[in-house]
Image: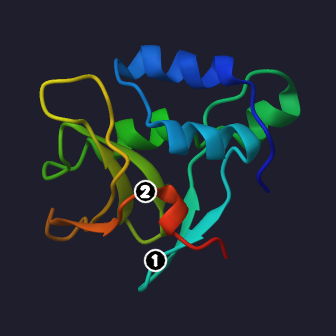
Amino acid sequence: MPFPIDEKYIIESEEELGLEFPLLFKEKMIVENGGEVVTEDDNWNLYPFFDKSDQKRISRTCNHLILETKQAKEWSNFPPHAVAVAGNGCGDYLLLLAVENTKQLGEKIYLWRHETGDFELVAENLKELTAS
């Protein structure tokens, strides 16, 4: 169940990753930290930012995107310049990729397939994905 988050937790995540999230992504997550989106082929659960404001929110956000990204990077074929922002429960991820030679993540959303390591563009930004 998505719920708002204080922007300070997004900033903490950016500092830990050494990357900046795109504006549209941050705006959506501030209002609904998590939730679901749909691509043509699958349903996806957006990973929340870790919210340490109280025990309930800690519990609700324990599968936060930093943790999920660290776990995804254990796959040898996961892109090193990517952040996992959603999962389908079957090992595949939706990604944001760092803009070359910057610390900025791009708005484009990519699907990464764990079996092959291939990734493909699925949306120009988070708003293009339909909420379920």
Q: Work out whether 122 lies above or below 17.
A: below
Rendered location of residue 71, percent (x, y): 37, 42
Q: Quadrant of the C terminus?
A: bottom right
Q: Which three-letter amino acid code belongs to the residue tagged 1?
A: Thr
Rendered location of residue 96, percent (x, y): 34, 47
The mark found on residue 125 in the picture is 2
Residue at 74% x, 25% y is 6
Q: CA distance from mark 1 to mark 2?
A: 12 Å
Q: Work out whether 78 lies above or below 14.
A: below
Q: Nearer the viewer, residue 7 or 88?
A: 7
The type of colouring in the image is rainbow
The mark that comes first in sequence, 1 or 2, is 1
Tell me: 82 left or right of 48: left
Residue at 25% x, 36% y is 98
SS for dot 2: loop
Q: Which three-letter amino acid code belongs to the residue tagged 2?
A: Asn
Q: Nearer the viewer, residue 56 or 9?
A: 9
Tell me: 121 left or right of 18: left
Residue at 61% x, 35% y is 49
Q: Nearer the viewer, residue 118 or 30?
A: 30
| Residue 81 location, quadrant | top left
Q: Which residue is mark 1?
A: 39
Residue at 26% x, 66% y is 121
Rendered location of residue 94, percent (x, y): 39, 59
Q: Work out whether 124 lies above or below 67.
A: below
Q: Work out whether 53 lies above or below 73.
A: above
How many callouts does the rendering have?
2
Label 1 with label 2: CB-CB less than 8 Å:
no
